[in-house]
Amino acid sequence: MANRYDKRLEDEDLWEVYEVRTGRVVLIAGQPYDGMAEHEADEIVQLLETGAVTPDDEWSVLLPPQRRQADPFPLPIKRRADLPDNAATTRRARRKG
């Protein structure tokens, strides 16, 4: 089975992980996986090949982030009496500005 990901020497002693098909550096959580030690690049390639880590979809990086919707199941609001003294004091201080 052919590898989908591999590493290549980016600069002296700095490696990058790339997708073999496209030649592009892999992005995970919006961060490019480059400028790392060889053993780190080996570990990332292994994790990607086994599916333990998945790279960002190249289109998700280009699209604006989705707006978050309100939580349909919000946590119950605690009453002031339920809060510890320091939390109640902090709340009052924030309100006063």
Image (tube, rainbow, N blue to C red):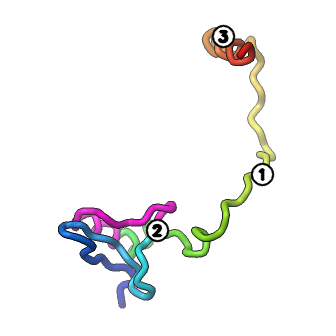
Q: CA distance from mark 3 to mark 2?
A: 44 Å
- Whether 79 is drawn above or below 9: the answer is above
Query: Residue 65, how many percent across, how many down?
Result: 66, 60
Q: Residue 78 location, x and y as percent?
A: 75, 22
Q: Residue at x 74, y 13 (%)?
A: 96
* Residue 14 occupies quadrant: bottom left
Identify the image quadrant of the C terminus.
top right
Nearest to N terminus: mark 3 or mark 2: 2
What residue did someone put label 1 on?
69
Disc 3: CA contacts within 10 A as few (<14), some (14-19) or many (>=20): few
Say if the magenta span includes residue 33.
Answer: yes
Q: Is residue 32 magenta?
A: yes
Residue 51, quarter of the rendered image: bottom left
Q: Which residue is denoted by mark 2 in the rendering?
A: 27
Q: Which residue is mark 3?
A: 89
Query: Residue 88 appears at what percent x and percent y?
Result: 68, 13
Looking at the picture, tell me which residue is in the foreground, 47 or 66: 66
Badge 3 vs badge 2, beta-carbon distance below 8 Å: no
Any part of residue 82 in sight:
no
Quarter of the image that includes the N terminus: bottom left
Span of residues in magenta: 27-45
Relative side of 44 to 90, left or right = left
Left or right, residue 15 beside residue 88: left
Q: Can you tell which of label 2 and label 1 is closer to the viewer?
A: 2
What residue sits 18% from the left and 69% below the top? Answer: 12
